[in-house]
Image: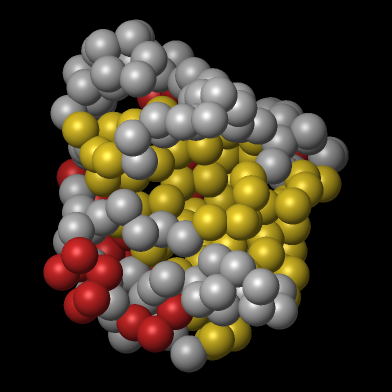
Amino acid sequence: MEVFPGAFHLPGYLTLEEQIALARRCGTIGGEPAGFYTPTVRYGARMRLQMVCLGLHWNARTYKYEKVRSDYDGLPVQPLPDDLKALARRVAAETGMEVSPDLCILNSYTEEGRLGLHQDKDERAETIAAGYPVVSISVGDSAKFRMGGTRRKDPLRTFILRSGDAFVFGGPSRLRYHGVSGILPGTAPPQLEIQGRFNLTFRQY
């Protein structure tokens, strides 16, 4: 379902079995040595989520990508597995767009988790200009996801992203402001055996 030009909400994209497998995978990735941590941004505030990056690390202090986590523990970033790259390409293809993802930001939210309004604009200028999409996949508790325009003051729409949903934004929507205003606790399918929400966002640097 196209919700803005170039932005698509794909409810229930993953089967329950795929959700279970992906939730377990996220937990395993987060438990690795270069796993989940709580980022501190450049002005000293701690983000209200835990994060781990695959392929390239997003430095929360410099807003740049790098191969080691120099803003935290100096560990090399975990690789982005080929099967997850293929999943992102498959989701993008459902919307008629193409992407060659080389990085993924995996966020873990508790019921208190939030993510302020922002633009995904730290990738290469030519990648953004080409409109290569960001591919987002959610498993676990539902989230209130907000998206507006290319100016922070533009009106916002709220979407409920449920477990198994995908959301893709590229082309004219690549630089829309977006964020997570709340998590709906207890809404994850019980078969996942998790509390909270995992969200994977795949990008082409």
Rendered location of residue 181, percent (x, y): 74, 52
Q: Quadrant of residue 133?
A: bottom left
Count of numbered circles in the view: 0
Whether residue 27 is visible: no
Q: Nearer the viewer, residue 143 or 176?
A: 176
Whether residue 155 is visible: yes
Q: Decide if residue 55 is on the left or right side of residue 90.
A: left
Rendered location of residue 54, percent (x, y): 29, 35
The answer to whether residue 105 is above or below residue 165 is above
Q: Quadrant of the N terminus?
A: bottom right
Q: Nearer the viewer, residue 48 or 9?
A: 48
**Residue in view at x 38 percent, y 15 percent:** 72
Q: Decide if residue 164 is on the left or right side of residue 76.
A: right
**Residue in view at x 34 percent, y 82 percent:** 171
The answer to whether residue 168 is above or below residue 135 is below
Q: Nearer the viewer, residue 36 or 70?
A: 70
Rendered location of residue 131, percent (x, y): 28, 77
**Residue in view at x 19 percent, y 58 percent:** 124
Most extreme residue toward the front, as rendered?
Answer: 43
**Residue in view at x 57 percent, y 39 percent:** 198
Q: Quadrant of the C terminus?
A: bottom left
